[in-house]
Structures are given as C-alpha cells and as structure tokens.
Image (cartoon, rainbow, N blue to C red):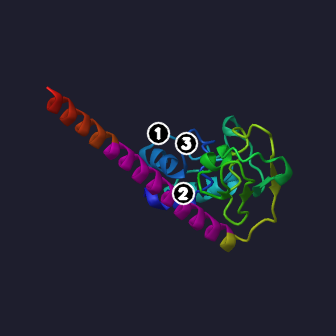
Amino acid sequence: MIDRINALLPQTQCGQCGFKGCKPYAEAIAAGTADINQCPPGGDEGIIEIARLLGVPAKPLNTRFGQHKPKQVAFIIEDDCIGCTKCIAACPVDAILGASKCMHTVIASECTGCELCIAPCPVDCIVIKPVPRPTPAQKAEQAQKAMRRYEARCLRQARAEAEKAERARKKKEALLKLKSFKQ
C-alpha cells in the first residue's frame, strides 16, 4: 500500500507535509498517522487520488501545510551565483550542477520545484518560475523520474556515510595498534 500511495504523490520531496520526503509521508498515511490532505504540491487532484485509493472521502488541502501552486522550477541567476554549493546540497533530486566557486545551474527537466534550494542561498540568486501545466502522462513520468533521482541520491548519501564510518573505524583501529605498539 505504501508504494501505491507514494506513486500518487508528486515526488517533489519538499517536506511541506511535515515529513522528510514523499515516501515517509506515504508510510505515515498508510499507518494512519498522517492525513491525506497534507501535500500542497499534490493539491486537490492528489488528495482525490489518494482518497480513491484508500476508499475514504476526499477533503480539502490543509492550508497549514501550504498552498497549492502550479508546477514550477528553480532558476539560478548566473551573474549573481558565487558557487557556494549550498543549493547543490539542499536539492533532494540532484537537479543542480556546479562546482565550488563556479557558477551553478539548474537542470530544469529534473527540478521538482520544491524550493529547498532558496533558503540556503546566501546571495538570493535563485528564483522560482512557473512552467506550462504538464499533461497527466507527463506529470506521472516526471514524478517517476523524480522518485528515481531522489532514491539514487539517498543511496549515494548512505554509501558515503558508510564509507566515512569505515574510514573512521580503520583510523581508530590504527591508532589503537600504534598506542599498543608504543607501550
């Protein structure tokens, strides 16, 4: 059931619902600990689809979590970008490219419009622009692509954390050997 609910969510990974991404929100809906109307990017259409899936009545979007907005993407004003990489770290779907101290850019076709890159930008060079309303098929395809990118990012981050922990373990082990050798 969790995967079916998650498939109906827009995969913006924005956290507006109060959860760290669409799948945790889907898990909470399935567990009965979250309501079906907490996703502003999904709007009324998303609420209706989830209600239909669960066989419960639809309800209006809970505006405590935000307002529904049309599809949008981030855009970096290149002349103002200082290359701090804070937007890259904030993007949940790796839709921003760049390197430290070099100008960054958004891959518009990959951007979910989550707005998570705006707050960490120290020079306010990121703006959100609306995009044409996608067809239902395009919307589903974009959500699937965003879900795959988010899952790949999570796997990459988990792998990096595991590698970091392993390096720390080896360093500690080497220090203990050195300490015992000196004694």
* SS state under label 2: helix
- The answer to whether any part of residue 84 appears in the image is yes
* Magenta run includes residue 158: yes
Amino acid type of the residue that numbered disc 1 sits on in the rendered structure = Thr
In the image, 106 versus 85, the foreground residue is 85
In the image, 76 versus 40, the foreground residue is 76
Q: How many marks?
A: 3
- The answer to whether any part of residue 60 appears in the image is no
Q: Residue 33 carries which label?
A: 1
Magenta stretch? 139-167
* SS state under label 1: loop
* SS state under label 3: loop
Residue tagged 3: 35
Marks 3 and 1 sit apart, C-alpha to C-alpha, by: 7 Å
Amino acid type of the residue that numbered disc 2 sits on in the rendered structure = Tyr
Residue tagged 2: 150
Marks 1 and 2 sit apart, C-alpha to C-alpha, by: 23 Å
Q: Quadrant of residue 95?
A: bottom right
* Magenta run includes residue 159: yes
